[in-house]
Image (cartoon, grey):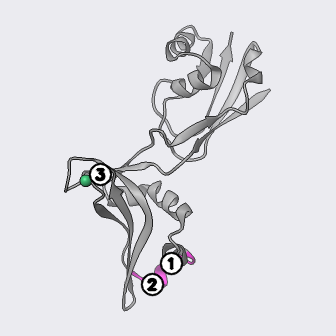
Amino acid sequence: MLNNWVVAPTCLPLVIRRCHICASDRFRASGRFRVNANHKLIDAWLLVLCTACGETAKLTVLERMNVRSVRPGLLDRLHDNDTGLIAELLQDPVVRRRNRIALDWDNAWRLDTGGSDHLDREVVDVSVRFAARIPVRPVRLIAEGCGLSRAEAERLITEGKLVSAVRLTSKLSGDFTFTLKR
Ligand SMILES: [Zn+2]
């Protein structure tokens, strides 16, 4: 029987970016967008706040874009300060590259295993799904989900009792499966 685990965000990740006022390099989403329309051209930014000093920074979402080429619904969501849109944009590689930011997912996700009943069996097959592209080492998830220490999980890998098609000790952010034999 295949068990399904989910890695799910619990809140928005922090934005890694250097503050030009203080020495901090973490910003949090303010929950607001700023939209500027000039004739037919639109600029839109996501406003983020320095976690240390509160300084506001703007992340570019749209840059001098013709209003007619903005995808339907996007303007309404920008004007409504849509929280789901903030999450989508932060995870959009184009937005991240354009603004030269990375994300800090520490304490912003959880692992849902649907209970621990399956852990008593001799062979456990688990499919892990990522609800957002959260970079994490599979060995850490497996240790947490199976109630093992990180060292125990690493020993099981070495002994060939914990197997997967992916490298369990390197960070990944996409779905994978693993098998644990005891
Ligand atoms: Zn600051």
Contact (Cβ within 8 Å) of mark 1 with mark 2: yes
Q: What stretch is highlighted in magenta?
A: 65-73
Residue appearing at x 77%, y 23% in the figure? 117
| Badge 2 vs badge 3, beta-carbon distance below 8 Å | no
The vertical placement of 155 against 87, above or below, is above
Mark 1 = which residue?
Answer: 75
Q: Is residue 70 magenta?
A: yes
Q: Which amino acid does label 2 sit on?
A: Val
Q: Is mark 1 within 8 Å of ligand 1?
A: no
Q: Residue at x 42, y 58 (%)?
A: 29
Give the mark toward the camera: 2 or 3: 3
Give the percent coordinates (x, y) of residue 4: 71, 34
Quadrant position of the C terminus in the picture: top right
Using the numbered discs, state the Cα–Cα distance from disc 3 to disc 1 in whole angstroms.
Answer: 26 Å
Q: Label 1's element?
A: helix
Kindly state the secondary structure of the residue where label 2 is placed: helix
Q: Mark 2 points at which residue?
A: 67
Residue wearing tag 3: 17
